[in-house]
Image (spheres, rainbow, N blue to C red):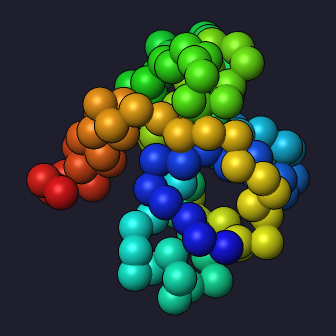
Amino acid sequence: MNLTQGEIYWVSFPASEGREQTGQRPALIIQTAPFNEALPTVLVVPITSNLRAAAFPGTIRIDPDEHNGLTVPSVLLVFQLRAIDRKRLQNTAGKISPSELEKVLEIISTLVGKKL
């Protein structure tokens, strides 16, 4: 599976305790080549349609458009960046814009305390 940073895939997240996202939902691919081809896992940002989540720091609201494949306004939960097994990726939904991807990478940089 050839993955590209900025793509949105449908993912089956495993059951979990607490506030982690679970179930079938879209997620943003963050990992870049050469890691996309070399590793059995991939870094993703879960996406929720619960717009109240936008109140948390480390989130970005995005609206559906012809490129991202989303059907409702959604929130990128950047603060929930996580590695998942590639087998959990189902099918591609679309891709976010370069400016949205830049915002996501800025938040990740802030989360880890380093300029990426």
- State the image coordinates of residue 71 (x, y, percent, origin top left): 73, 18
Q: Quadrant of residue 5?
A: bottom left
The tally of labels here is: 0
Residue occupying the far left of the picture: 115
Report the side of 42 relative to 17 (left or right). left
In percent of width and height, residue 3 lies at: 56, 65
Nearest the eye: 67 or 73 = 67
Residue 70 point in image, percent of width and height: 68, 25
Horizontally, is 98 left or right of 53 in the view? left
Residue 5 sits above or below residue 40 on the image: above
Q: Measured along the vertical axis of the image, is residue 70 above or below residue 92?
A: above
Q: Quadrant of residue 60?
A: top left
- Where is the C terminus found, in terms of image quarters? bottom left
> Residue 105, how many percent across, how many down?
30, 45
Near-viewer residue (89 or 53): 89
Q: Image height check: is 17 above or below 35?
A: above
Identify the residue at image location x=51%, y=19%: 62
Q: Is residue 39 above or below residue 50?
A: below
Between 35 and 83, the residue placed more toward the observer is: 35
Residue 46 seen in this snapshot: no
Q: Quadrant of the image for the N terminus? A: bottom right
At horizontal 70% and vertical 14% (from top left) the residue drawn is 72
Q: Can you see residue 87?
A: yes
Query: Residue lying furthest bottom in this view?
Result: 38
- The residue most toward the front is 66
Q: Is residue 88 left or right of residue 2?
A: right
Q: Residue at x 33, y 37 (%)?
A: 98
